[in-house]
Amino acid sequence: MAGNIGGNQPPPPPRWRSKHIIVVPIQLHDLPRHHENIITKFDPNKKESIEEHLLKYTSALEALHVENEDVACILFSYSL
């Protein structure tokens, strides 16, 4: 294992960062408290690109310490 000094590896990224499609039939985990104050809404009238909005959304997930896919998917609806 070249480049792995001392056997320490960084923790795996949260599952919501995966590129795979998931289906969330029900909410399995609780939503973080005060998420509505951190997740910003997309406003098509502003000069913000979709990519910029998604970057803000993923930053908000990290700030809320979201690790579960169902929570990430449900919170996305709050950004629209």
Image (cartoon, grey):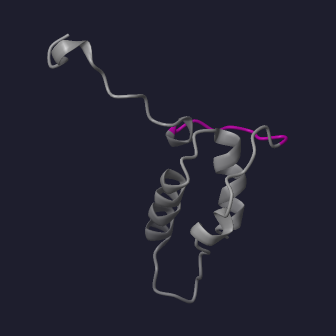
Boundaries of the magenta span: 18-26
Taking 22 as reference, is 46 left or right? Answer: left
Q: Residue furthest right?
A: 26
- Check residue 31 for magenta coloring: no
Q: Quadrant of residue 15?
A: top right
Taking 6 as reference, is 69 left or right? Answer: right
- Check residue 25 for magenta coloring: yes
Please determine whether, in this image, residue 11 is positioned above or below residue 2: below
- Our reading of the magenta stretch's main secondary structure is loop
| Residue at 19%, 17% in the rendered image | 4
In the rendered image, which quarter contains the N terminus?
A: top left
Q: Quadrant of residue 2?
A: top left
In the rendered image, which quarter contains the C terminus?
A: bottom right
Q: Residue furthest front?
A: 33
| Residue at 59%, 82% in the rendered image | 43
| Residue at 72%, 51% in the rendered image | 31
